[in-house]
Image: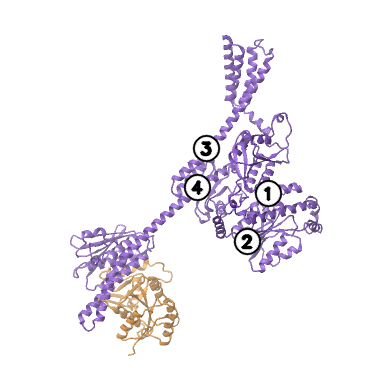
Amino acid sequence: MVKPTILVIEDEEAICNFITAILNSNGYQVIKTGTGKEGLSMAASYSPDVILLDLGLPDVDGVEILKSIREWSKIPVVVVSARGHEREKVEALDLGADDYIVKPFGTSELLARIRTALRHSPQSMGAQAQGEKTMTIGELRIDYEKRSVFLGGKAVHLTPVEYKILALLSKNAGKVLTHDYIMKEIWGLYAGDSHTLRVNMANIRRKLELNPGSPKYILTEMGVGYRMVEELEI
Amino acid sequence: MNELDGRPDPNALLADIQTQQDNHSGKLKIFFGYAAGVGKTYAMLDDAQEQYRMGKDVLVGYVEPHTRPETLQLLQGLPSLAPKSVFYRNIELKEFDLDTALSRRPELILVDELAHTNAEGVRNRKRFQDIEELLNAGIDVYTTVNVQHIESLNDVIEGITGVRVKETVPDSIFDRAEKIKLIDIEPDELLRRFEDGKIYKPERAQTAMNNFFTRENLKLLREIAMRKATDRISNENQNERRTTEKMANTKMLVCIGPSPSSAKCIRWTARAAEAFHAQWVALYVESADSEHLTLQQQKILRENMDLAEKLGAEIVSIAGHEIAISVSEYAKLSGITNIVVGKSRNKKTLKNLFDMDFEDKLISLLPSIEVHIIPGATARRDYKKPRKTIWKSKVDFSWADCAKTAILLVAATLVSLGLRMVGIGNQNIIMTYILSVLVVSRITKGHIFGIIASVASVLSFNFFFTEPMYTFNAIQAGYPITFLIMLVVALITSTLTVRIKTQAKLAVQRERRTEVLYEINKKLLVNRGLENIISLTNAYIVNLFERSVVFFPSDPEAGIEGSVMQADKDADEAVLNSKDEKAVAHWVFVNQKRAGAGTDTLMGAVGFYMPVTSQGKVLAVLGISCTKGPLSHGTRQFLRMIASQVAMALERQHLSDEQRNILVDAEKEKMRSNLLRAIAHDLRTPLAGILGASSAIRENTKTLDEGTRDKLNADIQEEAQWLIRMVENLLSVTRINEGESKVNKNPEAAEEVVAEAVSRIRKRFPNHRVEVSVPDELLEVPMDGTLIAQVLINLLENAVKHSPETSPVEVKLRKNGDSAVFEVSDHGKGIAEEDFPYLFTSYVPNGTKSPDSSRGMGIGLSICMTIIKAHNGTMEAANRKEGGAVFKFTLPLEGSE
């Protein structure tokens, strides 16, 4: 099997080093650079499978790099940002990034994100059948054709809106979806503020989760959006 | 001249340059000529063309339409401003468009005819005011003016040419000019131009020629113009313009009155004072007659006062009956060295024969003072009482006074009859009657009752006490004399009484004013706060003048409403705070000059507006309603005095506010440095740990076994985690706006925030049990999600660290009335008693405890407290009965907009 290539655009040497070390030892091929401009040209020439983009680059704003890449390619991009800069993250996600990871991060988190990104890349998407019939995560089973949801065998009654949200999240399992994105998909362009969304999410949580205060299936990314897990953590 | 005394103060010069640079005032160049047609406009345009060629931004503001083709030719190529059309009585007039010029803001603007009077409906009455506004806005101006328009030379020119020029320009603006260019040609040349029709249109030429354009006139005018220009040059040379101290030796005084010839004296004094470099005072003596001046006279008096003020005099008015005496007293007190009076040719009447002339009186009273006499043109009697008005006042009829007179006469008669019975002779009876006349004059108003009383006493004396009895025949020769004496006594007493009464009235008036000023000053000293100052000022003015007043504490355009206090039956809030009035007030604020009703600027306004200034800055604008009529000169002066008091109070207020701000800033600085110190202290320990562990690993790779190495690595990770949390805490604090303790609140689902915090803790401490409970209903709380998550993480970490691994840490969320309650509890050791007071402060107890044990409690909790407080919430800690500690904080549910 060909090793997937990952392009790491990160200016801090220490971080770059340890990312490379992790990825290499987990079966990925890594190309790295410290500047945005070089990153752009490398993305064009090497055509990697996933791009890991640091938002705080010295020469160009990371968001700008993202915009240029998205003009000609759908390569999955995972942005790296610092905690507390929610605005940046949301902006990047809305502009086409697929996922984000926050400094400082641990090994497992990084690998998980990379895996998700690869799974959702255009090639893999095309490989999978267009109509995924069902989705199972832990005890949760969603049947897209019948539009029904089962938790541990028992049927769960969801309102049409709640079902739509759940379906959207599950189809993008592992990926974080911003509030704006979800609202646009479900309610259209002029959805207004996120109050309705939150209420719906709260209802979904109460129907699916054992402890709504400690959700296992749908995680909240504070200030950014929601993410459905791909596999349950123990 | 004593050169040393005249040396300008270097600091004053520096400050002067500084203000000029700061204010960035435009420079004025005047093209000065002695008659129309010398070529001023031509020279101005020529100069402007050159400036334009050199690249300056030149704009032609307004140039009089000339028929001279050479002049018109020079206009070509220069950008020009369209004149504004003003409609006046169905005639369309073209005026200079000031507002467009101000907004266009060229570097240099040309405005012809400095002395022009604007049409009604334009903001300023005179063009020179327009030019002043342009200069204040930083725009350079070129303008033209003829010598006959200069205010101080006005009457001299009138004397020469016989033509009275109505449109004048104050000397101040002439002196303000940076450059004066004298345009001069030979009078013969000018006459030739005139004959050629190059100046006026041929139809008007003849009349103009006869009146003005004679060779004699032109020669004299030329001389005057040249002299004016040289005066300026010599002033510049000697740098005397900069001198603020005038010569202490000479001080001039001019008496002004309600007659037009006063104006001539005033102008002469202005010129003389300029020549002597002396101060001068314009004195007006208020006597009993001042109340009886006709409207026309009052107007002329006001104009004269304004003129004197414009020309630079100090205006003083004193009360007194005898003008010469009052003037001489004032002169002695103020150190006057020269007095200027006007001489009018009075008709010699019987009364005048015995009177000394006013000048003679003065000279006799003040032998050491020089008196200058300026002949007046009119035959008006300045200092004699206008006859018409006096008689009117004397005929004030009062029934009370009638009664008093009657009673007194009857009493006198009775007493005299009594005396006769006792046998006391006629002399005493006469005395009794004289006494009664005295008393009548004393207690009644005006002269008339005294006169009536004296006539009546003579008659009754005649009737009752002279031979033959009970008849009106006077036989004895002495009785006419007695009658005369009685009459004179009556007149003198009543005159004295009248005089005293008026003087008393005036004195009371003045005393009242001074008292009011003193009171205002006292109250302003005590009162703090802008509101108080404003309401106090307003109250006083309303009380004193019975007019509505409005106070703008800052630029009215900034949108702040003025504080209005309404007087009885006068303009109210709506009128005085209307957009138009605010516009006037704004103009005053920007231009630092008074405006409104009764002034030369924006005279259509409802109120009179004056700036309250201190040290060259405008602090506020005060407006008084003039719906009851324009303000008198005295009132305006009084207002100025009040304004200066208010200015001081405002400045004091401003300074104390600044002081308070500085104190607050200092406090904040202290807090910040305390925090930094505590943080640095706390950061040292984990860093030491990391350094130690990592160097141990690197230096001892051979000797360390797997387990130890692993342990050391774990330690490094642990310490690093702690550092990360600390840094995050600090970052959270910076998210709270400096000094305002405000956070950006968004409604967030509280349970999501809890979930985030819990998941983070679970990642770091996977072995520790954390239990979460949230209410059934969704709880939306306005908060900064990241910050509150931070608080929860801090609390959870503390709980985890201070309790054994097996015991659970509980997080509870619930609604309590109108707030959301978050509780974090553990089953650990709990909080020590002595720690309670310092729990939420960043105070690190020195010495008693080692830093290690208080680590993890100190900074984190104080930051939590800051965050909660910024949300208007509360936080507290307690020990649980079943063991362990519980930390509880609440957040209000409503958005606190």
Q: Which mark is residue B140?
A: 2
For label 4, the crowd category at 10 Å Cα-Cα, with few meaning under 14, some 14 to 19 and many 20 or more, is: many
Percent across and percent down for residue A65 are 43, 79
Task: Determine whether label 2 and label 1 are within 8 Å by CB.
Answer: no
Kindly indicate the quadrant of the structure image that contains residue B545: top right
Residue drawn 78% across and 50% down?
A: B211
Q: Position of residue B828 (x, y in %)?
A: 19, 65
Q: Amino acid at mark 2?
A: Asp
Are tags 3 and 4 found on a single chain? yes
- Label 2, label 1: how many angstroms apart (C-alpha)? 25 Å
Q: Quadrant of residue A106?
A: bottom left
First in sequence: mark 2 or mark 4?
2
Are the residues under marks 2 and 1 on the same chain?
Answer: yes
Which sits earlier in the primary sequence, circle 2 or circle 3? 2
Residue under the image location 55 percent in, 37 percent down:
B510
Q: CA distance from mark 2 to mark 3?
A: 48 Å
Q: Badge 3: how crowded within 10 Å, few (<14), some, or many (20+)?
A: few
Relative to B530, is B743 on the left or the right?
left
Residue at which label 1 appears:
B152
Q: Which mark is residue B646?
A: 4
Instruction: Give the amino acid type for the residue marked by disc 4 in the picture.
Output: Val
> Which chain hosts label 2?
B
Q: Which chain is orange?
A: A
The answer to whether dots 2 and 3 both sit on one chain is: yes
Which of the 4 quarters of the picture holds residue A90?
Answer: bottom left
- Nearer to us of marks 4 and 1 is 1
Chain in purple, by letter, is: B
Q: Earlier in the sequence, mark 4 or mark 1?
A: 1
Callout 3: helix, strand or loop? Answer: helix
Question: CA separation, marks 1 and 3?
Answer: 37 Å
